[in-house]
């Protein structure tokens, strides 16, 4: 979309969508046209090249026919929870529990009937600086979900947002999720992205969340896209006083994956924990950039990201903790651990601390290594063959993150997926 012709095509496609509040589409498209796609000349994109997406000039994905097997798979992903399901960004009717206490609607519905809900949610996260891909997402606003939890409400049932893709020709979907959690309220939201076949496509998703004073949000994102897909995501959360955020990211699929996860403390007493697991093999590339902005005093944050890389896969982790002048008595800790299963796998890791306050307790670190050969020998001495020993040790490494999924049925399904993925990755290394 860097050329004038590309920009004109984008304008036409955006104009064909339902009107958005506050001239959002026009302003976002101008912002994207000015900035363009992020390039490797930018420090934050040094190791992740989006040229293939930028050159493809992909059209918006069209609605796809949904058969019984697909409906079953979508319903299985929602499980016993409440939720919405989408294919190629288009809503699909799936039987699910109601989200008791929460207002749940599609973005398309709100654009038509309640545009102010969307405008208010977008204004609330405006304090966070985001990439041009979020501007492009706003220009094509239409797919996604809006979740509002009123004050003093506990939503017991997890809310699942399932996004699946099946395209006959390469196409793009721009998904937007808007979450507002009222004062002293609590909710669990699961975003699940999956490919229904091995088609080529691009999912560009953005999630905006605003937590009121004393609110608690547990947010889990599972990425199991097609092996030919590109997946870019931005999750940005503004936290009120004494609010709590638990963000958990599991990245298993896609050929290229970029996740930006940001938290901004707007008032004292907040806490966030950012946890993640990425498993890549073959020619896959995965990039996580996290940012915690301690713009208020007496806030705390913890972060643990773990990576398992095999084949010729490449990974990136960049975690930034910013403590501003007013962020006194900050307590922030960050750690990235990586396990390399092959000689050709590569990880670029860069934990960062930027501290402008003098009364803080902060730490950060990173480790990269192989499986412990002594531990493998110990297991083999107890009649466990080497592939099984490697799977067992690698599974234990991953389980520290997977075990933090607080939705029981979802945790079990992720454990099964991780086990199957590990068996394939370790089996591939053994056969070389």
Image: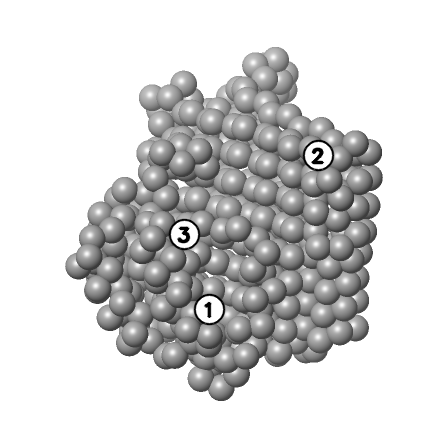
Compare residues 42 and 108 and report the one nearer the observer: 42
> Residue 145: where, in percent of width, then height?
51, 70
Measuring from the top left, give residue 277's x and y in whole percent. 55, 40
Dot 1 or dot 2, earlier in sequence: 1
Q: What kind of element bears circle 3? A: helix
Q: Residue 397 falls in which quadrant of the image? A: top right
The residue under the point 64% across, 63% down is: 210
**Scheme by which the image is coloured:** one colour
The residue that appears at 58% across and 72% down in the rendered structure is: 120
CB contact under 8 Å: marks 2 and 3 = no
Dot 1: element: strand
Q: Which of marks 1 and 2 is in front?
A: 2
Of labels 3 and 1, the one closer to you: 3
**Callout 2: few (<14), some (14-19), or many (20+) C-alpha neighbours within 10 Å?**
some
Camera-side residue of 167 and 118: 118
Mark 3 lies on residue: 132
Q: Residue 158's quadrant in the figure?
A: bottom right
> In percent of the image, x 51 and y 46: which residue is there?
260
The residue carrying mark 2 is 356
Q: In which quarter of the image is the C terminus?
A: top left
Q: Residue at x 26, y 44 (%)?
A: 52
Q: How crowded is mark 1: few (under 14 residues within 10 Å), some or many (20 or more)?
A: many
Please, is residue 24 above or below residue 335 in the view?
below
- Does residue 134 show up? yes
Tags 3 and 1 touching, CB below 8 Å: no
Q: Earlier in the sequence, mark 2 or mark 3?
A: 3
Q: Position of residue 186 (x, y in %)?
A: 73, 65
Label 2: which secondary element:
loop
User: Quick check: 375 above or below 290?
Assistant: above
**Foreground: disc 2 or disc 3:** 2
Disc 1 target residue:
144
């Amino acid at each position: 979309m860097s050329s004038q012709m590309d920009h004109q095509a984008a304008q036409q496609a955006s104009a064909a969508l339902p009107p958005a509040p506050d001239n959002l589409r026009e302003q976002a498209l101008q912002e994207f046209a000015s900035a363009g796609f992020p390039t490797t000349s930018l420090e934050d994109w040094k190791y992740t090249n989006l040229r293939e997406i930028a050159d493809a000039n992909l059209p918006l994905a069209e609605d796809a026919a949904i058969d019984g097997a697909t409906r079953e798979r979508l319903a299985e992903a929602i499980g016993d929870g409440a939720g919405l399901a989408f294919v190629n960004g288009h809503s699909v009717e799936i039987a699910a529990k109601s989200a008791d206490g929460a207002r749940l609607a599609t973005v398309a519905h709100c654009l038509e009937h309640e545009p102010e809900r969307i405008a208010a949610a977008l204004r609330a996260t405006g304090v966070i600086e985001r990439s041009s891909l979020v501007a492009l997402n706003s220009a094509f606003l239409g797919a996604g979900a809006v979740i509002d939890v009123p004050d003093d409400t506990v939503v017991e049932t997890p809310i699942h947002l399932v996004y699946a893709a099946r395209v006959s020709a390469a196409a793009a979907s721009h998904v937007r999720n808007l979450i507002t959690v009222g004062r002293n309220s609590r909710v669990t939201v699961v975003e699940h992205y999956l490919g229904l076949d091995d088609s080529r496509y691009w999912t560009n998703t953005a999630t905006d969340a605003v937590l009121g004073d004393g609110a608690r949000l547990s947010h889990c994102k599972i990425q199991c896209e097609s092996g030919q897909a590109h997946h870019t995501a931005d999750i940005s959360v503004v936290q009120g006083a004494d609010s709590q955020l638990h963000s958990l990211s599991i990245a298993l699929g896609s050929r290229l994956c970029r996740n930006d996860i940001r938290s901004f403390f707007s008032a004292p007493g907040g806490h966030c924990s950012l946890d993640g697991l990425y498993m890549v093999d073959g020619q896959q590339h995965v990039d996580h950039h996290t940012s915690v902005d301690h713009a208020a005093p007496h806030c705390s944050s913890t972060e643990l990201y773990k990576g398992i890389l095999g084949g010729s896969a490449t990974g990136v982790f960049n975690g930034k903790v910013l403590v501003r002048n007013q962020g006194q008595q900050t307590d922030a800790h960050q750690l990235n651990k990586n396990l390399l299963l092959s000689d050709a796998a590569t990880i670029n890791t860069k934990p960062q601390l930027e501290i402008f306050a003098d009364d803080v307790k902060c730490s950060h670190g990173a480790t990269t290594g192989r499986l412990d050969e002594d531990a493998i020998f110990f297991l083999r001495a107890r009649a466990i063959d080497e592939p099984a020993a490697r799977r067992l040790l690698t599974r234990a490494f991953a389980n520290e993150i997977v075990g933090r999924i607080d939705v029981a049925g979802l945790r079990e399904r992720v454990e099964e997926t991780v086990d199957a993925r590990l068996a394939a990755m370790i089996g591939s290394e053994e056969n070389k």
